[in-house]
Image (spheres, grey):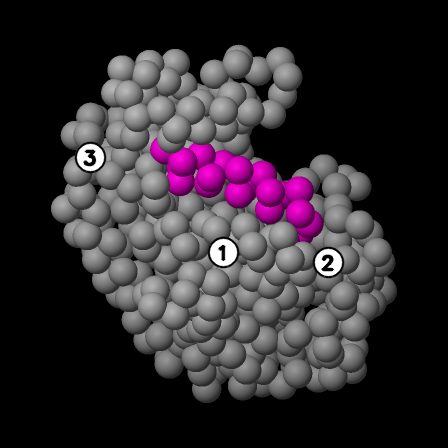
Amino acid sequence: MKIAIMGTPVTSGNRGVLALGASLINLCSQASPGCALVLLLGNRDNQPAPFRMGGDTVLIPVVNYRLSPHSPLRQHLVWILLMSMLYRLIPATSIRASIARITPWIASVIEADFVGDVRGGDSFSDIYGMNGFLLGFLAAWTVVLVKGTMVQFPQTYGPYRHPVARRLARFLLTRSSVIIARDQESREIAKELAGPERQVLISPDVAFSLLAARPESIDVDPPSPREVPPGVIGLNVNGLMFNGGYTRSNMFGLTLSYAAFLPELIRAILAVHPGELWLIPHTYGAPGDVESDDDASLKLLRDLPPDIRRRVRLVAATYDQHEIKWIIGQCDFFIGSRMHACIAALSQGVPCVGVAYSRKFAGVFDSVGMGDWVVDARSCTLPDAVSRVVDRYLQRNGIRVELAQRADQARQRLHEVFNHLCSQASGLNGVAAVPCARHVPHHPR
């Protein structure tokens, strides 16, 4: 079997989208042992990308599209689109073979038993703007043109602010052979768009299966005399929320002033917690980058009063998605505003509050029975948000065992879904897969 995966970059400061790719690769490999995998994505180059699998690093082939006018013609998205249209319009076998020979993207789509798209988990929506949504649509459209169908991996569907986005979403969903939602509300939206007769599966987020890997060292600022002190609280600061979104003007329509909320939360939580609080970034970026969790965390730390600051540390080094998950797993309690930072906690049985900027939080938390542990920054006041987080902190030990059990059930459900998906795909006609992943020894940093 050969499986092509779309919608997850291989180079990004966002550890959440990297967690999606790593999780999908492992889930597909476990569901179809020996399968050949390929990544179809927008990327500057097509060098194989390393991913952890067990104790090894596996190099997964990359077939890329580009938007730069200086890119090779056969890699440019416009060329791929035009060739995909020709492939669809001209049924002659010889012409189709020629198109595939000069367009690696199309050749990979043809060879795959199925092509699955995850859209970064939550980008099958125009919540982040139409430009990103349209780019994702065009890449997916090439697959539909060539193959006639595709698979939608577990993700969030909607919301759609613009009617064009809604129509394009319907176009893709009605042409998807398998649609998987990661929450009930998304499932209902997908069913509405795809048609009531279409089956939409429901599954936990794939990152519940992500491997946690202990880092070689943990670098915090200020330095800690102990690697991880007992009972530490983890706080993930979302740089995008801190800076008001890409527009820097409350892009997500929050009623809660997130930047004002954070110092008040730290003050309140440390009043009832005897230990330390660690700021744990989950998206890395340069100083001034609107996305950067580490930059926002550093600004927050510096502005805290001295009596509070002495009990707060910043996880200062850059860690991959597996390592940051391990660090989050050492926390006694976690507060996150990045969806996959929260999943890193929930999947390891760490009681967690999600401070949400979109509805995706509620659905994912609800998948493990933690729906009432979400504080929605779109409707909460500052005092209420602080009070709710502190209240959940005081309840943390009562939920811990049950949460761990539900996290195990989520992982089992994921394996069931992917086993079903791959068993269904194995009955399709497709080109025999060729070995395309090679193992190299894994050396921790």
Circle on res. 241: 2
Identify the residue shown where x is 58% and y is 39%.
135
Vertical placement of 166 versus 216: above or below?
Answer: below
Whether 443 is among the magenta residues is: no
Q: Residues within 10 Å of mark 2 (few under 14, many from 20)?
A: many
Q: Depth check: 113 or 272 in front?
A: 113
Identify the residue shown where x is 49% and y is 36%.
139
* Mark 2 secondary-structure assignment: helix
Q: Residues within 10 Å of mark 1 (few under 14, many from 20)?
A: some
Q: Is residue 141 visible from the viewing direction of this image?
A: yes
- Residue receiving disc 3: 430
Q: Earlier in the sequence, mark 3 or mark 2?
A: 2
Q: Which residues lie in the magenta part?
A: 126-146
> Where residue 191 appears, x then y in whole percent?
42, 67
> Where residue 411 appears, x then y in whole percent?
31, 63
Circle on res. 170: 1
Q: Earlier in the sequence, mark 3 or mark 1?
A: 1
